[in-house]
Amino acid sequence: MNNNALVSSSNFSYSITEVEITPIKPREGLIAFASFVFNNAFYFSSIGIYTKIEGGYRLTYPTKLVGNRNLQIYHPISKDVSEAIEIAIFSKLNEIFGRIF
């Protein structure tokens, strides 16, 4: 199965490749971590994959605790990019766990 996602809009074209999933022992809904390459230029990792109470999955992006504040390291700001990342990661997750998410 090809887990590469190519997304185009009127102004941009981008790709999500080399998606990797690292399953972990489930803890408080966290079941795995994901990483991928964006546009053959940026490597993103430490993306948490959590189960949702109502079913399905959600992604969380890394943060850093500084004092009493959690600062976001990175996250998608475009809905198109966010959806493409979810599709690529959940497709790979489906391949590993053998069921549709």
Image (cartoon, rainbow, N blue to C red):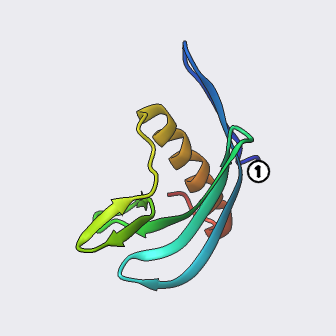
The amino acid sitting under disc 1 is Met
Name the residue furthest left. Answer: 68
Percent x, y of residue 82: 47, 42
The quadrant holding residue 27 is bottom left
In the figure, is residue 88 to the left or right of 29? right
Frontmost residue, 36 versus 66: 66
Instruction: Name the residue: 60% across, 76% down.
Output: 23
Name which residue lies at 41% across and 38% down: 77
Residue 9's spot in the image, x, y percent?
Answer: 55, 19
Q: 16 or 71, which is in the foreground?
A: 71
Q: Which residue lies at the image location 63% right of the left edge and 73% below the top edge? A: 22
Residue reaching furthest to the front:
67
What count of labels does the image hold?
A: 1
How crowded is the residue under tag 1: few (<14 C-alpha within 10 Å), some, or many (20+)?
A: few
Q: Which residue is mark 1?
A: 1
Local secondary structure at mark 1: loop
Residue in view at x 66 percent, y 54 percent: 36
Q: Position of residue 93 (x, y in %)?
A: 60, 62
Between 53 and 7, the one nearer to me in the picture: 7
Indicate whether 45 appears above or below 37.
below
The part of the image, by quadrant, that contains residue 73 is bottom left
Is the residue 11 above or below the residue 90 in the image?
above
| Residue at the outermost top position | 10
Which quadrant of the figure has residue 4? top right
